Image (cartoon, coloured by chain):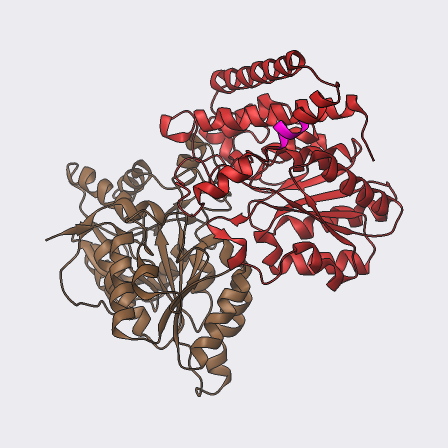
Chain colours: A brown, B red
Amino acid sequence: MRTLGMGQAINEALREEMRRDEKVFLAGEGVGVGLHGDDPFFPTYGLLDEFGRKRVKDTPVSEAAIAGLAVGAAATGLRPVVEILFFPFITIAMDQIVNHAAKLRYLSGGKSSFPLVVRTMSGAGFAAGTQHSHNLEAWLAHTPGLKVLMPATPKDAKGLLKSAIRDDDPVIFIEDMLLYYVQGEVPEGEYTIPLGQAEVKRPGEDITVVTWSKTLGTVLAAAARLNQEGISLEVVDLRTLVPLDKRLILESVAKTGRLMVVHEACLTGGFGGEVAAVVAEEGFAHLKAPIKRVAGKDIPVPFSPPLERFSIPQEEDVVLAARTMMCH
Amino acid sequence: MALESGMLRDMLRTMVLIRRFEDKLTELSTFKGEFPGLALLCTGQEAVAVGACAALKKDDLIISNHRSHGHLIAKGADPKPLMAEIYGKRTGYCKGKSGTLHIAVPEIGAPCTTTVVGGGIPIAVGCAFSAQYRGTNQVTLCFFGDGAANEGSFHEAINLASVWRLPVVFLCENNCYAAAQHLRDQFNIDNISARATGYGVPGVSVDGNDVEAVYEAASAAVARAREGEGPSLIEARTYRWRGHFEAMDHQLYQPEAERDAWKRRCPIQRLKRQLLNAGALTEEVFGQMEAWARDKVEAAVEYARKSPVPEPREALEDMYAST
């Protein structure tokens, strides 16, 4: 099977959905003429050339207006896919996303719908500092009315983005920039992946490790190492945070009896707490050990590489946590 | 108003230092593994920082953005801890926690620098409010780019400053591009300074590559602010010679001819020629300025290289002022 980086897979998803449905348009800062215009690993490569300025709209630096544009366009027959370049800048768009995109359908008694996608990019590890690297998925997951996707592989990114664009609800699609450069197998031909389905990326017996986005790679590396010590991790990639695939998580914990949650975002208030609470409430009978979260430190992501590495979960942290859990 | 030649020579020297600092970063750019991350350079824009900061007193404040090296050097930053911060070393101004993007140097009157476009503008208003409240007579000068003039925060902040008559100068450093977006794709007006009238504020556009013109406009605005007459908007028109960041940006969106035309309007060469013609400078003296700048920057790089990286656990420090 051919391999693509995540950005290339996203590019294919955008291209295919824009060819399929002329109501789909893109808007954002540099989606047409961008800084990375000549980099085929970036998601919007070549889209302006194919679809033109009517459907690929470069905007001024105005995140609130971009998000509001998406809400209004979605309410009136279009299917916007807008981009907030770096995740931390979504803060400027939060009123439109939280108070409007998420709530207006409900407020209309179900008469209006907002088939929009907000794509954004984050993740630490490239020395960009905390105002460029800040994983805020917990904020979006804590907003009823939104669907929240955070794929870890190119195959999942493509299939999920296609579904997100076809979904009639507001979807936040969170990408990781370093994953643009990690190759993964992507099937040829048309396929979609449904929202709300987690996936077991590596079956195992001893500990269910739930994770998403870039830490999937960290967890799989730890799993390979732990395997040699006789500890078998079952790695569950959420892919979708909201709606959460509780069934798959609980089935896995019923099998292993142990839950670890790993995420790059900081620990306190992170979405790992939600996963842990669900299992503590609904899967308590199966637990043989306390639930463990391995997450980013409760600090802004620092710039200097030794500090940055310390601030986000590393393979070693997962390995140590797993060994501790096996003592129970 | 013709400026006194000693002052102009000082401005020239500072511009030469900034140029050398930025050019050195271009040489050392990240692909050679010298320093982590990216460098965002103000090469070609030196007159804006220097002209503006020359109009400020030592205890006046500046708010800067992601393209801060010129602003900070012009305000009095020491190239050594500045370079050390870019290198992510413990001896950097922010102990390696910030890197180039948000370097704060409160000790020289640069309390906040932010890379969120437009984020610094309301902060500048807060600093100005504080000065007014405490009766300190300080003025705050806010640097931001053309891109930031389209953020909601710009409009809210300038309106508030106008209504409350705050001692703030809004300086829009229009370098023609917001990342890869040219002005024509961001604005439906020719002069960003025209927006000032919408807020009851005087606005002026100046040649940002003429350090005297920048100084004159900034001085007038600073005087207004200090006399309690409220804010002003200055648009300094300049051009970014390098990409948005060093070195991944191949600048495909910047036509070669456009860049060359602006390079011929180099702020340093312009002032140098003017001073030579006026007999206020010799090639020899200029050569001494360049040598001085080279030595200062080399020393800064050596300092940065030799400085220790932070220990990982230092990441947990500096979170809260009290627990």
- Apparent side of residue B115 relative to residue A206 in the rendered image (left or right): right
Q: Quadrant of residue A137?
A: bottom left
Quarter of the image with the N terminus of chain B is: top right
Q: Which residues are magenta?
A: B267-271
Give percent across and percent down for residue A125: 38, 40
Quarter of the image with the C terminus of chain B is: top right
- Apparent side of residue B91 relative to residue B215 in the rendered image (left or right): left
- Taking depth in this image into account, of B159 and B16 the one nearest to the observer is B16
For residue B322, say whether it is visible: no
Query: Which residue is drawn at the image coordinates 64% and 32% (left, top)?
Result: B72
Tell me: residue B154, above or below residue B113: below
For residue A16, say whether it is visible: yes
Give percent across and percent down for residue B113: 62, 41
Give percent across and percent down for residue B273: 66, 25
- Taking depth in this image into account, of B23 and A103 the one nearest to the observer is B23
Tell me: residue B26, above or below residue B156: above
All told, the count of numbered labels is: 0
Query: Which residue is drawn at the image coordinates 29% and 60% (left, top)?
Result: A239
Residue B270 on the magenta span: yes
- Apparent side of residue B314 relative to residue B7 in the rendered image (left or right): left
Query: Which residue is drawn at the image coordinates 55% and 29% (left, top)?
Result: B95
Q: Residue furthest front?
A: B277
Give percent across and percent down for residue A318: 30, 41
- Taking depth in this image into account, of A2 and A179 the one nearest to the observer is A2
Magenta: main secondary structure equals helix
Tell me: residue B34, above or below residue A266: above
Query: Which residue is drawn at the image coordinates 24% and 54% (left, top)?
Result: A154
Residue A169 on the magenta span: no
Q: Quadrant of residue B192?
A: bottom right
